[in-house]
Amino acid sequence: EIVMTQTPLSLSVSPGQPASISCKSSQSLLHSDGETYLYWYLQKPGQSPQLLIYEVSNRFSGVPDRFSGSGSGTDFTLKISRVEAEDVGVYYCMQTLQLPPTFGQGTNVEIK
Amino acid sequence: QVQLVESGGGVVQPGRSLRLSCAASGFTFSSYGMHWVRQAPGKGLDWVAVMSKDGNQKYTADSVKGRFTISRDNSKNTLFLQMNSLRAEDTGLYFCARSLRALDIWGQGTMVTVSS
């Protein structure tokens, strides 16, 4: 199975400052159809996960534009341009290129 | 609005069975693949199973293969997870989620506790 590795596992950020999370996959997530099946989720405290970014860099409906995704092949990054209090929670990357779908370990983001 | 509501969780002894349900509303259920994902207390997300939109294809994680069965009833807009031979390590919050490619809508989860 494809192993997803996130760094860092924990991040403390002051409001208004940027934040960045890395996700590396054990093999390329590029499909023969040209799409890359890499997704980012945020699980806020006490809530279910919510989709932020699909296929590397596309923001899901309603996601603020301070969130952006980038990368290719095996290396991906989620960036928050200016962290707000409502952004606290655990961020996960996920691949669905190959069964079984797999998640990163999660990155816990807190506000300083 | 688009909604997934899980039910059927509870406290069960090791070796016993439980059947989870996921009721869908607000969208055409039969147009989406459906997943189960679980989360042990204080831990990360752990994918469990998927079923295609027509129910003809399904796949389960190795950790539950032979014990858990995913199914769906498109006439009732409902997804199921039959869990047999439950173990302590199956304890967690079980989410259902719909997908075309991304798992874009998730339910709130139903808690399963396996304990003697």
Image: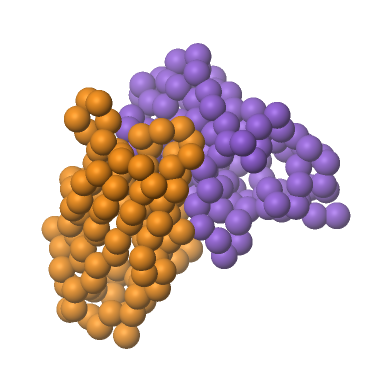
Chain colours: A orange, B purple
Q: How many marks?
A: 0
Identify the residue at horizontal 42%, vertical 27% (top origin): B33
Residue A62 location (% of width, % of height):
21, 51
Residue at the extreme right of the image, as rendered: B116
Residue A67 location (% of width, % of height):
19, 60
Query: In the rendered image of this protein, does residue B28 appear above or below residue A45?
Result: above
Query: In the rendered image of this protein, does residue B7 appear above or below residue B77?
Result: below
Left or right relative to B71: residue A89:
left
In the rendered image, the quadrant that contains the C terminus of chain A is bottom left
Residue at the extreme front of the image, as rendered: A27
Residue A93 location (% of width, % of height):
36, 52
Left or right relative to A76: residue B54:
right
Left or right relative to B62: residue A35:
left
Query: In the rendered image of this protein, does residue A76 appear above or below residue B99?
Result: below
Identify the residue at horizontal 33%, vertical 80% (top origin): A12
Residue A7 location (% of width, % of height):
36, 65
Query: In the rendered image of this protein, does residue A19 appear above or below residue B55?
Result: below
Identify the residue at horizontal 75%, vertical 34% (top origin): B84
Residue at the extreme bottom of the image, as rendered: A112
Identify the residue at horizontal 83%, vertical 48% (top origin): B13
Task: Identify which residue, A75 or B114, lies in the foreground.
Answer: A75
